[in-house]
Amino acid sequence: MSEFTVTCTLEVNIPTKPLLFKITVDDKDVFFVNTSETTYNIAFDVPEDGNDHSIKFIMAGKTDDHAETDDNNDVIDSAQVEIKHISIAGVDITGLLMYETSKTPSLFIEYTHDGNGYDNKVTVPFSSVMGYNGVAEFKISSPVHLWVLEHM
């Protein structure tokens, strides 16, 4: 069976406060890290089998201790992971998938979270930053070259 490669770049703003982060393809782990570096360049393969595939970016382990506060106890920074770039089979699709830049709302990555337990669970269009424990998911079909042609 053939495969196509997905590459992405993740940026972590506070690597001294590690977060659990993983990527799955069809609910199978393809990447897992306890974030301790500022940048991760990741590549993984997806089956080119004529089926639809789910790619999930999952962040977990964030607590109130991941926030930095000032003397007044106001949050001045909070640990997060940003997805800076996504390419499929060598084609940059970042702009297709991110809420601020996509012209096709049905392609948005959907981000499901509950505000780390402070809110009700919501699913919203993703804008590149994972600041809450949750799942950012997008779906792609193969053959991938047809998916790219249809959506570019």
Image (cartoon, rainbow, N blue to C red):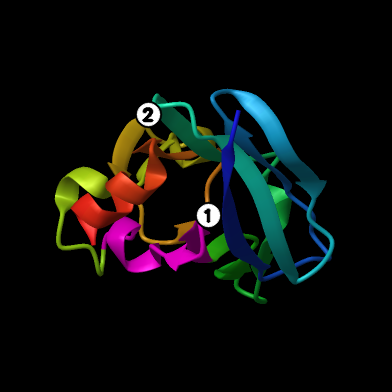
- Dividing the picture into quarters, in which one does residue 92 lie? bottom left
**Magenta stretch: includes residue 87:** yes
Q: Which element is circle 1 on?
A: loop
**Magenta stretch: includes residue 31:** no
To which residue does mark 2 refer? 121
Q: Position of residue 96 (x, y in %)?
A: 29, 61
Is residue 150 or residue 105 the one in the foreground? 150
Is residue 72 or residue 131 the one in the foreground? 131
- Dividing the picture into quarters, in which one does residue 114 lie? top left
Q: Position of residue 17 (x, y in %)?
A: 79, 59
> Is 120 on the left or on the right of 36, as rendered?
left
Q: Amino acid at mark 2?
A: Lys
Q: Quadrant of the N terminus?
A: top right
To which residue does mark 1 refer? 131
Q: Which element is circle 2 on?
A: loop
Residue at (60, 73) in percent of width and height: 72
Of label 2 and label 1, which has the lower sequence position?
A: 2
Depicted 30 relative to depicted 82: above or below: above
- Dividing the picture into quarters, in which one does residue 95 lie? bottom left
Q: Position of residue 12 (x, y in %)?
A: 68, 66
Q: Quadrant of the C terminus?
A: bottom left
Q: Which stretch is magenta?
A: 85-99
